[in-house]
Amino acid sequence: MFPKTIAVILSTLPLFSLGSEKPIKVFIVAGDELVLEQGIIDGRTDGISDAFYPNLDITSGEPKKHVNCAVYAGAYSPTLDYDTMKPVDTGIVELGEQRTRQIQSGKRGREPIPFTPFPEAAMKDGYTTVLRGWVDVPHKGHYEFRAGDGESSFNITTVNGIETYRRAPGQTEATITPVKLTPGKRHAFRTVFFSKPGHAFRIPILNKPGALTTVVANQPEYAFLKNTDGTWSTRDDVVLFDAHPIHNNTETAGRFLTVGDVAYGGRKPRGMIGIEQTLGHTLGDHFDEPVMLVRFGTHPSGFSRGSRSLAHDYLPPSSGGGAAAETKWDVIHFNWGVWDMAYRDPKPGDKWHSNKFTGKLTTPLDVFDKNLRELVAKMKATGATLVWGTITPMHKDLPGRFAEDPPRYNAVAEKIMKENGVHINDLYAESIRQGFPIRPDVHSTGNLSAKAIEAIEAALAAHPNPSKPLPRVLLIGDSITGSYQNAVMKHFEGRANVYKNPGNAEHTGTGLKHIDAWLDPATYLMSGQEYMELVNGVKKTFADMDRYYPGYKGQAVELAGLVWFQGIADASSSRIAAEYQKHLNNLIQDLRKDLGKPQLPIVIGTLGWDGTHATPVRDAQLAADDPSNRITSVDTRPFLRPAAVSPASSEAIYNGNAETYLQIGDALGKAMLELQKK
């Protein structure tokens, strides 16, 4: 079913080390976004709030983000009682972050909305300004009141009559005393400015319930997650590797287990944890051998279409596998180049390190010409209409690539394409048109989805005798192709069957090694792309452990189990939910076969919330429980906590509650250990 050039027969891997190093126990952790980091780490918020009010009680028409302002004659004096004095001016002023609005209907961009201003006297010398208002808070916890910035940060703020903030003139740092507040009521505050007042006002909570820092501080059983100096601990006997080609679009090697997520491909860290923490600790504590978690999942954001379903994305071969009626390609959209023009300067532990001044060019221009001609010839022989996606521009500050190289490589490619009648999709020009790149990241390209869809639409229209019942489109490329892959698939859903080559096509040299297998329609069958990528990702990991496992010493590797945690998208409709049990049973059967482990231990985490059609999905997950067949289901409903005691408010991802993910990971790990005994 899968390309012989990239397949590894896992059942033939040695299960015991012949050397002094202990074999590595590998556990697959696969599914939708539930296998990724969703539990919030930091219990301290940025304090942005709009819950400021001028009245104690809810009043019809009251302006949110506004409080009462009074201005008194004379400079501030601690001997004066401003609560009994008569002000010279009063008003309602706005606090917090400045609001914005659309610049103009149909135009991009936003502009700030002017604050509701202070009374005129407040901005003059010789006056004292006092704010009086009420706030409410979303969670029970300890809050800081940070009033003002710049000159206005010199003030005294009290909450419920207790001084919480003081910065006197000449004081370098403010004295801040957290105050315990509860939701469901309004809390009175007063701010007296020593000088000019300001609109800035933040109320950060220090111990948001359900955040990891709060959980660890309050519950000793999770103290193992921190070192004695307060930093997060790291396990050098447990490795976490993300094998999903979109989530880990740079194929970054695995890392030793520690708190926090990795920002692949220039993305920002999410500041979250998932089931990997306690799952890894539970397995790591049990086994003398090192443990590797090979995780496969991606977030439903950006170009990644949506939560991955078992009815479509992970559809196993037994649920609809089999070659299409006509096994040919109608359109092939392809691109190479980003990897070819990289200058590699391998370092210990980082064989893919790039440096354009000291590194070696991956594919010189003449070799690129030769390789690309061979690749085009092979693709042209399929009879498909070919579309070349040009190499996207490079930022001048990229460490491993020159900004001048894409035009040079594109010029070589353009000559080849014109000689062979290949359509050219100018992604380079489209990226420049959108104002990219804006940062030193090869993925800073803008949104190329519409341009790719337009080019494929035109190619399909020009292709004679398209396949029946639907034309077949193949995408071949690296992570740039991955950036528009799912948008293309979604656009053509029901109009064309769209597939992508397994994994990352990397450079043209890699393409030549695998192109025959990638062009074989039987490789893809009718099973879901995600299923194929999962099996390919596991096999690729085993085949190149020295690339993905830090400090690999050639020891034996054993596939020891699979954790399946998924189902959000399948709960979106009654029809899909009703099919879940059949697809899940087939998934188990097919994965065991394709991974060469007929008795692979499998632990299934159920959906934890009662969404529209979540119940039949969860019932199917629970029905799969069969310890005699080395399958166990773990009901995660008992771990779901309400939003009131959680950092977020989305039940599908357990309201972002870190303690919930710690408990689920531990339960899944213990269930896996029970199966290891059988």
Image (cartoon, grey):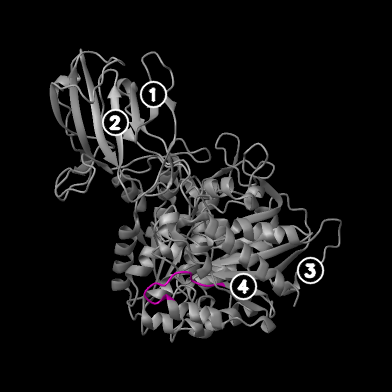
Q: Earlier in the sequence, mark 2 or mark 3?
A: 3
Q: Earlier in the sequence, mark 2 or mark 1?
A: 1
Q: Quadrant of residue 354?
A: top right
The residues tagged by marks 3 and 1 sit, at their Cα atoms, a distance apart of 65 Å
Q: Earlier in the sequence, mark 3 or mark 1?
A: 3
* Residue bounds of the magenta highlight: 605-614
Task: Describe residue 165's horizontal placement relative to residue 225 as left or right.
Answer: left
The residues tagged by marks 4 and 2 sit, at their Cα atoms, a distance apart of 55 Å
Kindly report the secondary structure that dominates the magenta region of the rendered protein: loop
Residue 97, position as x, y percentages in the image? 28, 37
The residues tagged by marks 4 and 3 sit, at their Cα atoms, a distance apart of 21 Å
Quickly name the residue at label 4.
Answer: 603
Q: Earlier in the sequence, mark 4 or mark 3?
A: 3
Callout 2 amino acid: Arg
User: Which class describes the residues within 10 Å of circle 1: few (<14), some (14-19), or many (20+)?
Assistant: many
Callout 4 amino acid: Val
Q: Which numbered circle lies on residue 15?
A: 3
